[in-house]
Amino acid sequence: MQTITVELASAANERGYPILIGAGILDQPDLILPYLLQKRVAIVTNTTVAPLYLERLRMGLESHGVAAISIVLPDGEEHKNWQTLNLIFDALLSNRCERNTTVIALGGGVIGDLAGFAAATYLRGVPFIQVPTTLLAQVDSSVGGKTGINHPLGKNMIGAFYQPRVVLADSATLGTLPERELRAGIAEIIKYGLIRDPAFFEWLEQNMAQLLARDPDVLNEAIRRSCANKAEVVAADERESGVRALLNLGHTFAHAIENGMGYGVWLHGEAVAAGTLLAAELSQRMHLLSTAEVGRIRKIYLQAGLPVVAPDLGVEKYLHLMGMDKKVEGGKMRFVLLKRIGKAVIHAEVPAAILTGTLVECIVNA
């Protein structure tokens, strides 16, 4: 088992939490016990993950004297909404869960976001633990405290920053992950190399076949390096007022794809892959990134079996949906662009003609 620590500081006290990474962690409930304020938990999961891992976690905790209630939600991005969130509140209230009852998120990014937002707001905040079971959640969404739900007008527009007490990433759970979900998670792994870690990007170019084959050592190393990168960024900018926005490379386009296609039609990682290619093409047209490097980026996403062409929603719809992005400031869209592989920057001054031209050339005429 490996441990990455997310260091967070505040004026009042030092905060932080560990990310535990390794195979078989789910079978070690004693790792969770030190982070419980009382021996009572509410495990939030979904209909896909519950048959695989819920009883194992629940029985493991109960063998240590922890009382556990189970909250099983419908699966899918299309359920990341107020209605599903209220199912969690209904269960917490009907079971008389108290302020020291810990909410445990067992599942992928949707479950982590829903359970985390519920924990942040139930009784104005109860303890929260992440047990991510998808690659995307293990390398990205479970780390950093972003929680929330989607709105018909925009993805992740309603939520809270709320940090977990610990993250337990059991790489053995990836053995049951569908191939499409695995590839979607790799999209976020590639992102870390693109924005800040060129050596990691090169390592991924060399090890992509082993990663796709789920080689345990390669998987654990990819998770470790991804979490280490994210932990450093989150420690420097917990609430995304500066450098943390760079983690959104490709996401302005990606969120437009997810919303425009209908939540759940494209997986988040698939939209990030196509969105990152659009960001790379836009960077090249802004004379920031070389054509050769755009080619390398396209190649690695193709190696991973991810889409490199975004769906044709129409230029006007893309512009409208991107105008709803959280990074919009002063009425201006802000884009995360690349100066080179390993160096991302934020641009608020992207000429409309270049943005429109990129969309036309890379989507409409693709």
Image (cartoon, grey):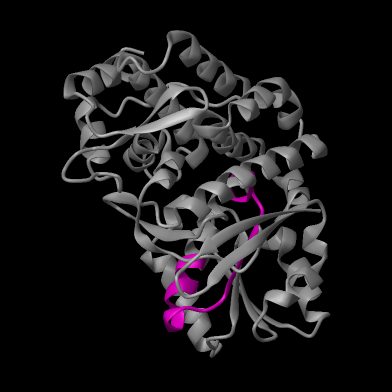
In the displayed orientation, state which residue is furthest to the top: 292
Location of residue 193 by image quarter: top right
Magenta segment includes 124: yes
- List x then y, in percent, for residue 45: 60, 64
Left or right: where 155 falls relative to 332 = right
Residue at figure coordinates x 52%, y 65% from the top left: 163
The span picked out in magenta is: 116-138
Q: Is residue 34 visible?
A: yes
87 and 97: which one is in front? Answer: 97
Residue at figure coordinates x 45%, y 60% from the top left: 147
In the displayed orientation, state which residue is furthest to the front: 11
Location of residue 16 by image quarter: bottom right
Q: Quadrant of the C terminus?
A: top left
- List x then y, in percent, for residue 73: 54, 65
- List x then y, in percent, for residue 160: 40, 64
Left or right: where 280 falls relative to 73 = left
